[in-house]
């Protein structure tokens, strides 16, 4: 599957990711010490979904840093939908294949409720 991350977003958020990593390591070093940059970015972005204030701040940082506003909004929409689908356990067969969703995480399959 192609990346849905807006162009330059990871580069623009580099400083924020360093702060986030420092916070995590101070909080629980053993749990987060083996996270690579991709894992930290995923965790960082996942944590934004439930925090509208932080999401707005990150959106401003990204758009001021050159990330296209429309691409950012589309990315957040897809991310929110992914989180919702993950919580409900509703996946299409295509998504299960493309996103490598383990069959034990699937509570219901669908043909219409898709991310892509």
Image (cartoon, helix red, strand yellow):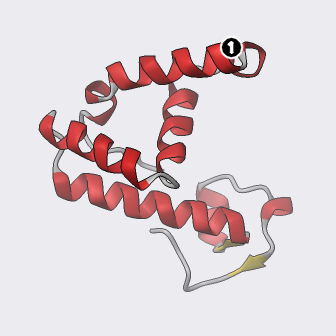
Say if 93 sits above or below 75 in the image: below
Residue with the most extreme front position? 53
Q: Is residue 26 left or right of residue 37?
A: right
Location of mark 1 (residue): 33
Please tell me in which quadrant of the rendered image residue 66 appears.
top left
Q: Is residue 77 visible?
A: yes
Say if 23 sits above or below 80 in the image: above
Say if 10 sits above or below 78 in the image: above
Pick whichever, 68 or 110, lies toward us.
68
Pick whichever, 12 or 2, lies toward us.
12
Identify the residue at image location x=17%, y=43%.
63
Q: Is residue 4 visible?
A: no
Secondary structure of the residue carrying tag 1 is loop
Pick whichever, 12 or 109, lies toward us.
12
Residue with the most extreme bottom position? 112
Q: Is residue 39 left or right of residue 63?
A: right
Q: Is residue 28 left or right of residue 70?
A: right
Identify the residue at image location x=58%, y=60%.
83
Identify the residue at image location x=28%, y=25%.
11
In x, y percent, where is residue 76?
38, 57
In x, y percent, where is residue 99?
61, 54
In x, y percent, where is residue 116?
45, 68
In x, y percent, where is residue 72?
27, 52
Identify the residue at image location x=68%, y=52%.
100
Residue with the most extreme right position? 104
């Amino acid at each position: 599957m192609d990346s849905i991350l807006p162009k330059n977003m990871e580069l623009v958020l580099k400083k924020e990711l360093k702060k986030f990593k420092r916070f995590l390591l101070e909080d629980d070093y053993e749990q987060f010490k083996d996270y690579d940059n991709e894992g930290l970015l995923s965790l960082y972005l996942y944590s934004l979904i439930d925090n509208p204030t932080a999401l707005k701040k990150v959106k401003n940082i990204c758009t001021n840093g050159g990330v296209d506003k429309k691409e950012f909004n589309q990315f957040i929409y897809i991310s929110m939908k992914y989180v919702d689908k993950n919580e409900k356990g509703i996946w299409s067969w295509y998504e299960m294949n493309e996103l490598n969703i383990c069959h034990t995480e699937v509570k219901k399959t669908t043909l219409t409720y898709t991310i892509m």
